[in-house]
Amino acid sequence: MNDLGEVFFVALKLGLTSFGGPIAHLGYFHAEYVERRKWIDNDSFSELVAICQFLPGPASSQLGIGIGAIRAGLLGGIVAWLGFTLPSAIALSLFAFYMKAADFSAAPWIHGLQIVAVAVVCQAVLFMGRKLLINVFLLLMALAAMAASLLFNGIFSQLIIVVIAGFLGLVIFDSKELPRAEHVKIAHGKKLAMGCLIIFLLLLFLLPGLRALSDNYFFAIADGFYRSGSLVFGGGHVVLPLLEKEVVANGMISKDIFLAGYGAAQAVPGPLFTFAAFLGASSGGIFGAILAIIAIFLPAYLLVIGFLPFWQRLRQNKKISRALIGVNAAVVGLLLAALYSPLWTSAIKRPIDLLCFMVLLFILMVGRLPPVLVVLIGIIGSIALAHLGWF
């Protein structure tokens, strides 16, 4: 088997089996790529993780893209992304078509999925807050970011919030050096890397213009999902508020369908960003699903390929380290805003909803069950409560 085929099938195996979100994905990747196949040494793996945490976008997908590119060049990065992404993207697209084929809007298990989504995001907020909000000032920054996100709903409002937070971090905080490793070998040069970064910026600024000049629905999908993939620091659940503003606030799909799909996304392996496939399929059919999934992941590919040759110099920049402290606080605030609206306001309406949420959160936080089992518990529990007349 040639390198490209091997990269694809190893990534496909991970895409079929990697449950548990981006932090868990790092463990799966380390076991497969470092320990079993020895495609990359431990120091290089740690360095690549640091790169992906520094860049906006889905960290686990970017890590896979980076390892694929190191193993088999630029095409290796693409096939690694395909293998890791296809299983969950296909599953969520099929779920979207299944929901469109019949009216499930009043089904109790749909509401159960919505409550699961609230519990999962609440767990993420608590985990990130405990890790990133290490002093009172950072907590206040997060709360200010949450308030600003709820008050201002413009297309670039979240980008402005992140930029302001980064500036405050640069001005106020002490630098924190990232761990050092010197073993990543990059096959492509700086010229190609610069080309990727230029394409990234051109698309980021040109797509909104094309969307404004045309009523074409697919320009709206391309712009909205590309921007969401470009501006999210932390990946995973943090993309939720951006996607909600793009598809719910703009009337592409209903809030109930959005939340049900987000709950279902917890039950599939692979990157959470494949939730975009559900949204694209729900609003634009097969082509909408394909366009949404490409648009939301394309920034990740361009940024990883673009930044790899420059990382050694950038990672030693103390100003960048300080700015990231503020950016991380803003990310927690944006996720808090998403937890309140649309999640809490749409799913928690009755005392029984609150009770179900508390039980599911307890299972996640104390029982430490994987999200896929929590989804099943939420679905089965909501159906059982409906039969009892309580739900």
Image (cartoon, grey):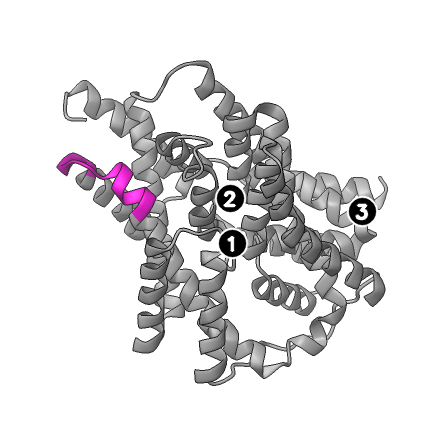
* Image spot of residue 8 (x, y percent): 74, 41
Q: Residue at x 71, y 45 (%)?
A: 80
**Residue 210 higher or lower than 306, as above or below:** above
Read off the residue under disc 2.
Answer: 272
Q: Element at badge 1?
A: loop
Q: Residue at x 83, y 60 (%)?
A: 192
Tag shown at residue 75:
3
Q: Residues within 10 Å of mark 2 (few under 14, many from 20)?
A: many
Q: Is residue 6 left or right of residue 54?
A: right
Q: Residue at x 33, y 22 (%)?
A: 105
* Image spot of residue 187 (x, y percent): 84, 61
Q: Is residue 254 left or right of residue 189?
A: left
Query: What distance separates the C-alpha of mark 3 from that of mark 2?
Result: 23 Å
Read off the residue under disc 1.
Answer: 235
Q: Residue at x 57, y 59 (%)?
A: 56
Q: Element at badge 3?
A: helix
Q: Is residue 13 visible?
A: no
Q: Quadrant of the C terminus?
A: top left
Name the amino acid, label 2: Leu
Tag shown at residue 225:
none
* Image spot of residue 243 (x, y percent): 47, 44
Q: Which residues are magenta?
A: 341-353
Q: Is residue 61 visible?
A: yes
Q: Is residue 336 magenta?
A: no
Name the amino acid, label 1: Gly
Q: Residues within 10 Å of mark 1 (few under 14, many from 20)?
A: many
Q: Are marks 1 and 3 in contact (CB under 8 Å)?
A: no
